[in-house]
Image (spheres, helix red, strand yellow):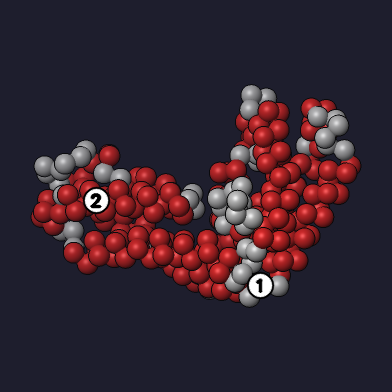
Amino acid sequence: MDDRRLPFTFRLDELLPVARRLRASYVRDQTDFQDLLPEDYTPAFLKDFDAASAAVEGVQRSSVAIAERQVVTQRIAGLLDSLPQLLNRLEARVRRAEGLSVPAKKFGIEAVRRDRNDNEHEGLADSLHTLLQNIEANKKALLAKGQKPEENTQIQRLYDDLVQDSTAQGSDLSDQRLLTADNAQLFRALYAPLKHLFDDGKSLYKTADKVKLQDYTLRKVLQQVRREQSAPANAAKKG
């Protein structure tokens, strides 16, 4: 068995931000959790949780990969900023084009737009891939309506760079030898209570409180974390 195997698929640099968000939600809802599982959610739970977080933070602070990660984030932000206008122009041409192989509503533009707006970087690569396939299959009809080859090339470049940069994000910390067997044990130790909070939060709020349920849904928490991580780069560009 690989001692460096992790029980989660999101990036290492997202673990602590996810933990901080989940901790805040738990503190707010602590009474509910203690009522649900009184033997598990004792004062020791939060103490152990904080100790596990501190251990992971100590590891990550020592890594030069944090600075490199910020550069990658800025590059991705730049790529995503140029995407809406490309989609808007393509959408107009798809709407007017004749003889398309798929209906305009199923061309894939809306999926790309949604994933981009939701900061779903992994999903965005997939939806861009589908969009590019439809562009290629309908190239002649789109060119007749004014779609420029360089615009197709730019969308392709966005896809290629996003895939490359997403891979770099996922490997930054491990490339810096952060993912050693000892460190992986620390990452697993922090993820274990997170997993309990996600699962037990769903048990508490799946039918009782749809708003709080989002705070214990990994996909939603990751969206918030990634939005916050990209905000400084976007602000720098606007400034």
Mark 1 highlights which residue? 63
Q: Nearer the viewer, residue 13 or 174?
A: 174
Q: Position of residue 103 (x, y in %)?
A: 21, 38
Tell me the SS state at disc 2: helix
Amino acid under label 2? Gln
Name the residue rendered at 41%, 65% in the picture: 164
User: Is 72 positioned to the left or the right of 215 in the image?
Assistant: left
Report the side of 199 relative to 31 (left or right).
left
Q: Nearer the viewer, mark 1 or mark 2?
A: 1
Label annotation for residue 133: 2
Is residue 12 left or right of 73 when viewed as pictured? Answer: right
**Left or right: 18, with 88 as reference point:** right
Check the image and name the residue furthest to the right. Answer: 43
Whether residue 140 is situated above or below residue 219 in the rendered picture: below
Q: Could you tell which of marks 1 and 2 lies nearer the N-terminus?
A: 1
| Residue 179 seen in the figure | yes
Residues at marks 1 and 2 touching, judged by CB atoms closer than 8 Å? no
Label 2: few (<14), some (14–19) or many (≥20) C-alpha neighbours in 10 Å: some
Dot 1 falls on a residue whose secondary structure is: loop
Q: Quadrant of residue 163?
A: bottom left
Residue 9 lies, with reference to residue 204, above or below; the image says below
Which one is nearer the viewer's eye here, 189 or 154? 189
Q: Residue 94 carries which label?
A: none
Residue at 37% from the left image edge and 45% from the top image edge: 111
**Between 121 and 44, which is closer to the camera in this rendering?**
44
- The answer to whether 160 is drawn above or below residue 194 in the figure is below
Quadrant of the image occupied by residue 199: top right
Locate residue 81, reporting x and y percent.
Answer: 42, 63
Amino acid type at mark 1: Ser
Q: Who's the residue at 41% across and 62% down the image?
A: 162
Q: Where is residue 24 in the image (x, y as percent from the top left)?
A: 75, 47
From where the camera sits, is residue 233 visible?
no
